[in-house]
Amino acid sequence: MEGLAITPDGRTLVGAMQSPLLQVGNIVGSANLAAKAVPKLLFLDVVGMLVAAGIPAFDIPAKLGGLAFGPDVVIAGQAKHTLWMSNDNDFTPVVPNSHHASGFAENPNTFFVFAFDEVDLPGFVPQQFRRPHRGERDDDRRWNNDPDDRK
């Protein structure tokens, strides 16, 4: 899987495979380009999973978008990978929502964490980080108080 993307409606996460990359610069017309489209497969039905977890569809945030793979976890004795997803509330703590008696609903920034198996995302390999050994530079912490790190 070379890429994950959220559909324009913000409700579905799809994975894209790109092998080999095609040059489409001289192809004209959507019908001609359709045959060269990168294949996609459904990875996560975000709304379906959240509704199944007890969140009413009308309370699912409108702007889901922040995505990151998280640490592996063990659930019921089974190792799982995690995908973290957040929303952007645009600093708007309350939004109109006719499904609530007041006509409004709270709109907090929220994080959702989904667990998935190896078979759900074939070929997924979590990125590995190694801690620097004593005396080595840690480029992830370049700007600390050590003047030698400011080169």
Image (cartoon, helix red, strand yellow):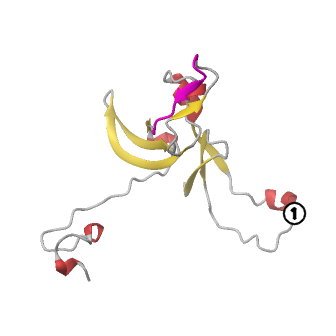
* Residue beneath the point at 54% across and 27% down: 105
* Residue beneath the point at 72% across and 72% down: 23
Q: Quadrant of the C terminus?
A: bottom left
Question: In the picture provided, is 34 more to the left or to the right than 39?
Answer: right
Q: Quadrant of the N terminus?
A: bottom right
Question: In the picture provided, is 26 more to the left or to the right than 78?
Answer: right
Compared with 34, 7 (above or below) is above
Which element carries disc 1, helix, strand or loop?
loop
Compared with 89, 31 (above or below) is below
Task: Determine which residue is flagged by label 1.
Answer: 29
Q: Specify start and end residues of the magenta stretch as a single range.
A: 101-109
Question: In the picture provided, is 23 more to the left or to the right than 60?
Answer: right
Is 90 included in the stretch rendered in magenta? no
2 and 78: which is toward the camera:
2
> Where residue 36 sits: x, y (%)?
76, 61
Report crowding for label 1: few under 14, some 14 to 19, many 20 or more residues within 10 A (C-alpha). few
Is 104 included in the stretch rendered in magenta? yes
> Where residue 92 sits: x, y (%)?
52, 40
> Where residue 13 sits: x, y (%)?
58, 43
Tell me the kind of residue under disc 1: Gly
Compared with 145, 104 (above or below) is above
Question: In the picture provided, is 116 more to the left or to the right than 143?
Answer: right
Compared with 74, 8 (above or below) is below
* Residue beneath the point at 68% across and 52% down: 39
| View extreme (top): residue | 101
Q: Main secondary structure of the magenta part?
A: loop
